[in-house]
Image: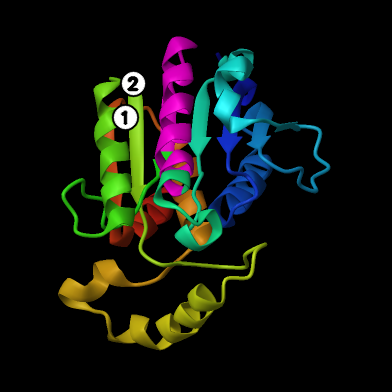
Amino acid sequence: MTTNRKTAIVLGASGLVGNELVKILIQQNNYQKIHLLVRKSIEIDEDVCEQHVVDFEQLHTYIELFHVDDVFCCLGTTMKKEKTKEAFRKVDYQFPIEAAKLAKTCGVQKFLIITAMGANSKSLFFYNQVKGDLEAALKKLALPSLHFFRPSLLVGERVEHRFGEKMAEKASVLLNTLMVGPFRPYRAIPAKMVASAMAAIAGSNKTGNHLYLSHEIDRLVGKST
């Protein structure tokens, strides 16, 4: 399959990184079709994009859409929004795992996903535990080409206004100048940079499992330009 005939799925296109990723993929023009799987309809008017409002709890019923080359998973939520740990885990663990299983069944070449800087199944923090469990479960699926992106605090224009995160973004402008040496991995990172890195890796020939820490993501973008 030639480069400009590739197809892809983006899960979480309405989110901070997902929104930027879709813009970049359209601009790159490497895909003949990009399927956007969303829980709620979003505003987009691009011939290359085909939007699907899906019930993620019944994701297996959309298996035909997974006959693509690449799957980008940008799904994520917050405890504040979901209210319970069970509901949070469903979005940040169950849905991505189900998507990955469908991807493997349909012969997807690359699966690229955003997790978190502190992803660790043994973490004391529930959020990081879930992300760690997610990474471990995905590795067990033995996908042909699996890529984890672990950003620190994401900055950018969100569709949803999150007061706490907005305040943290403002503080990060100053803190980033102080985070040098061993503290560099904790710098806030623009969502657009993470999206650019995902797009760059999708265009590579890497196989196997790969992990990109927050401070390494900007290097990926630099190498692709």
Q: Give the mark nearest the N terminus, 1 or 2.
A: 1
Q: Percent from the top left, x then y, of residue 122?
A: 16, 49
Disc 2 crowd, CA 10 A, few/some/many (<14, 14-19, 20+): many
| Coloring applied to the structure | rainbow
The kind of secondary structure element at disc 2 is loop
**Above-or-below relation of 67 to 128:** above
**Above-or-below relation of 204 to 63:** below
Q: Is residue 203 left or right of residue 32?
A: left
Amino acid residing under circle 1: Leu
Q: Residue at x 64, y 30 (%)?
A: 55
Q: Percent from the top left, x then y, of residue 97?
A: 41, 29
**CA distance for labels 1 and 2:** 8 Å
Q: Evaluate if marks 1 and 2 touch, with contact meaning CB atoms under 8 Å apart.
A: yes
Residue labelled with disc 2:
143
Q: Is residue 108 magenta?
A: yes
Residue labelled with disc 1:
138
Q: Residue at x 40, y 67 (%)?
A: 153
Write the start and end of the magenta stretch as one range: 88-112
The kind of secondary structure element at disc 1 is helix
Question: Would residue 225 be visible to someone looking at this image?
Answer: no
Eye-nearest disc, 1 or 2: 1
Question: Would residue 190 be visible to someone looking at this image?
Answer: yes
Q: Closest to the observer: 75 or 22?
A: 75
Q: In this figure, what is the number of numbered marks?
A: 2
Within the image, what quadrant is residue 1 found in?
A: top right
Amino acid residing under circle 2: Leu
Q: Residue at x 50, y 57 (%)?
A: 83
Q: Which mark is residue 90?
A: none
Q: Percent from the top left, x then y, of residue 60?
A: 55, 18
